[in-house]
Image: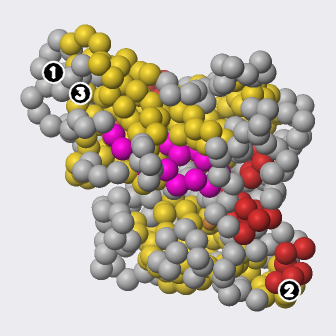
Amino acid sequence: MKLNRRDFVRLAAMSVFAQPVLAVLQSVTEVRRFRLELRPEQRNWIPESEMPVDLWGLSDTQLTITQGEPVEIEVVNQLPEPTTLHWHGLRIENAMDGVSGLTQEPIPPGGTFTYRFTPEDAGTFWAHSHHKTYEQLARGLYLPVVVEEKMASDTDQDILMVIDDWRLNNEGQLDTESLGSLHEWAHGGRLGNFLTINKEVQPSFTVKAGSRVRLRLLNTANARIFAVDLPEVPAWILAKDGQPLANLMQVTQTLVMAPAERYDLILDIPRDAEGQLSVTMPTDRAPIEMAYLQVEGLHESKRVQSPNRLPANPIDEISPDQMPDHKVVLDMTGGAMGSMTQAVYNGEQMSMQELIQHKQIWAFNGVANRPLEPLLEARSGELVEIEIINNTGWAHGMHLHGHHFKADLARYNPDLWHDTLLMDSGESARIRFVAGKPGSWLLHCHMIEHQAAGMVSWIKVIG
Ligand code: C2O
Ligand code: CU
């Protein structure tokens, strides 16, 4: 072959640029490796008690990774039961979603499983067991996951508060006898009687007067909806469920958080603040103090501007007037004081009595638990609208795996993205999302007892 002059120029240009480009690619694809052991742990929550509380946990208290950087996480199961880890809110490959019996077989005791993914989105997420979740979550098998932005955000400090309630018995131990209580499954789920933040009792975080704090809140309770009052300082919502807001919203009222919901906030600590600021949970009696910000020292530089928004994650915007490619209804029924009389379970029509024998009490579109057929099938990139109707006497926190959606519920600002949505009894919501990565993605109530007792469906995305 005879090269003419133009070909020569092209090749020459390539050889000049090829090398540096390759070098950059290589540095980007270097994999960060982690090893997480799932194992029993103990906490000294009650000073008077001689015995620490026996829980389950992970060998780390937080996983911090970086947006766009591939990770490999070797999970070692040192528990007496099989388990998995689900990466809640992370839009990763379906095979890494960690759903026992759907995307993977559970990791047996003594076994390991390596999760490999590259987090597309920065934000606040979490990992938790997705095998016998009602028990394993109640025992503490979860881990907050912070995916840092590639560029540092304009804050002085990052504080994470993982809110949980535990059911302790009279001996101050985890009440394991009530795990699986059908009564609770039919009502509001398992509510605890002991509150912790980061698995600690009323922890205190030191902050400087005049500083700008990024506060990440995460509700890891099995079923409790938490109300959270921030200290009276200027505060904004930066992100919900890991997705940044296009315009920051000033926090003017109590934050209400269903299980699994997250808020990323900015708190500007005034320059004249001193002593202890508290984060509290309002109740009909006195508020409960959840955690403290202890003001010590003064931040050197003065902040004059209000905070900046976070850079957007690479998620497709959803325009409200675009026609969806798929529209389906999801009718939620069942539970105590509901009118459900029958449902399909494992492909079989059953009476309420038979369902109860299988511990099934709730249904989506007349099917209790994961149906054989998906709620809908969509191609990657198609716009999906699901109208969710809460025809039950209870609140639910609806979670879609592997996707973020917008919703038209008055409780929320319409600009917020969600992977979990709180719906009160009698409410309906239209959720809209763009079908993401191919695979089988669960859609379930994150009041985990409701999920166990029937509130779970799934969608199928094809490439
Ligand atoms: Cu947070 Cu199906 O889970
Ligand atoms: Cu529910």
> Which amino acid lies under the numbered mark 2 shown in the image of this protein?
Met
Quadrant in the rendering for residue 145: top right
Mark 1 in CB contact with mark 3 (< 8 angstroms): no
Label 2 to label 1, Cα distance in Å? 65 Å
Closer to us: 259 or 200? 200
Q: What stretch of residues is rendered in magenta?
A: 217-230
Whichever of labels 2 and 1 marks the residue nearer the N terminus, that label is 1
Question: In the picture provided, is 295 more to the left or to the right than 100?
Answer: left
> Which amino acid lies under the numbered mark 3 shown in the image of this protein?
Ile
Q: Check disc 1 and report the residue beneath it.
A: 272
Closer to us: 392 or 172? 172
Nearer mark to the viewer, of 2 and 1: 1
Helix, strand, or loop for circle 2? Answer: strand
Position of the C terminus by quadrant: bottom right
Nearer mark to the viewer, of 1 and 3: 1
Q: Check disc 2 and report the residue beneath it.
A: 350
